[in-house]
Amino acid sequence: MSGDETGVVIVDAELAEKAAPLAQRLAADGAAAKLAAQDPTLWGPDAESEASIRLSWTTLHKSSRPLIGEIEALRAELRSEGVDRVVLAGMGGSSLAPEVITATAGVPLTVLDTTDPGQVADALAGDLERTVIVVSSKSGGTVETDSHRRIFAKAFADAGIDAARRIVVVTDPGSPFSELAEKEGYRKTFLADPHVGGRYSALTAFGLVPAGLAGADVARLLDQAASVAETLAEDTAENPAVQLAAAWAAAHEAGAEKVVLADTGSGIKGFPDWAEQLIAESTGKLGTGLLPVAVEGPDAPGFADHGKDATAVAIGAPEGAAQVSVTGPLGAQFLMWEFATALAGRLIGINPFDQPDVEAAKKAARALLDDPEKLKGGEAPATVDGAVEVFGSEGVSTDGKLADVLRAFFGSVADGGYIAVQAYLDRLDDASTSLLRTEIAKRTGVQTTFGWGPRFLHSTGQYHKGGHQNGSFLQITGAVGEDLSVPDRPYTLGQLQHAQALGDGQVLAEHGRPVLRLHLTDRAAGLAELVRAVQEAAQ
């Protein structure tokens, strides 16, 4: 199978045997063809109402074609004015797909899906004379994205630049954001298909506009999706989406509730991060689902030693311990994984289009922002070790040095559970924090995920609260040097970031999950101490 062909190979013989009856069941039920025809009854009567307005992604390879000319025209206009730096303000599905598309194409795109003041300040420090910001939000009410819009609008105005001419909007028709964009006279508003949920929106305006303005060939993406669309609608056990869905569901039935994703030379950059959101938000609910674990490669801990509670999926050639291999160009992969995830939802018995537990963390953060004194004061740390302050939810041991605290935390992980490292930091300047995933997974033998906050709240956050309740959560927050005010809002970015961390931790604790928060009073020094403590704790 060449890299241009889209296909799935179940490498593990035992898994292939278990998956075969499920693939046959999907084929006999006509599930793939019904999905392609946007039949909302596939997931049962409780899901039908939501599914009926969430299935237009199956034909985006056709319906998104008119966008190509609009994107190309705007890009040419901007470049004629010397504007060739594209910043994207978006969260979840509005940022992950464009990031994968542009990274794979090798074109620059500055992605803002953070509330870290330092990372936003770095984006502002770029050449504003050459900058256009794409603000992507279905409603416009996403707090992170709204904050970015306000901050950039002020920065443009302060620099003597007509802000309205430098703001491009992607939103749903008739949304409050589309009305605001018209009122403010923003440069252009692209209207996305409202019958597509965020995590299925890679081939809508949300994925294509920022990527296309940055210079990616988005027409080619649609061609790639079109090349596999008929195959994905076939009711056969050989349909690659059917095979992938059957493999996931069969493994889940056997107790493998985690899917470990590793790139094995596919040429696609960052695909596991996009697939992570798609799978986690779609399946992680009602106390069940599939937890995606994005790892560094086929030799990474968690993939090479996946164990019985996880399925190792290679994106590319079936290297190392891979049990499943998936190949194909990016546009085709987007559509195939979306089909597979929706079909897996049918087999597992969940609605793949809702996200019932996402709002809880947002509400908790808003409540903290409404109580500035509580947010500012907070609780005193249980322990301080060097540049690290230690906070723990009820039942989490905080006694002793940092290594002692971590040793107890790692030792208390439920059998078959997982550790989620959640870093509310700058994912560029504090990038080395991601090495904690490898260190912890290698030294504990426990499946370990890593997410940048608040980015992961729009991705794996749903699974954390709604999926299998066996996660242990390690939050990392850090001191803010220079904070950024949010124009016309009573909070700063640093306060928002802190509220998001505390709010999510509060909700997780209410679900009975252990939460250990480590606050770095000096980010560089604290991180070095944390790495040493992880190594010591696992000795």
Image: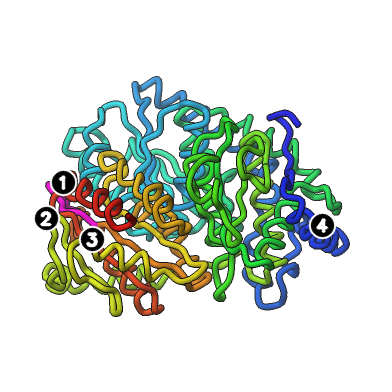
**From mark 2 to mark 1, how far is it between C-alphas?**
9 Å
Please, what secondary structure does the residue beneath circle 2 have? loop
Name which residue type carries label 4: Ala
Say which label, 2 or 1, has the lower sequence index.
Answer: 2
Q: Earlier in the sequence, mark 2 or mark 4?
A: 4
**Residue bounds of the magenta highlight:** 477-485
Kindly report the distance in space between the C-alpha atoms of the residues bearing marks 4 and 1: 52 Å
Say whether marks 2 and 1 touch (CB < 8 Å). Answer: yes
Label 3 or label 1, whichever comes before in sequence order: 3
Q: Do callouts 2 and 4 mark residues in contact (Cβ within 8 Å)? A: no
Q: Give the Cα separation between the discs numbered 3 and 1.
A: 13 Å
Pinpoint residue 413: horizontal percent, then vertical percent: 41, 68
Report the side of 32 relative to 268 (left or right): right
Q: Which residue is mark 1?
A: 525
Question: Does the rendering let one see residue 293?
Answer: yes
Q: What SS does tag 4 mark?
A: helix
Q: Which corner quadrant holds the N terminus?
A: top right
Residue behind mark 3: 518
Where is residue 418? Give x, y as percent: 46, 63
Can residue 63 be found in the magenta stretch? Answer: no
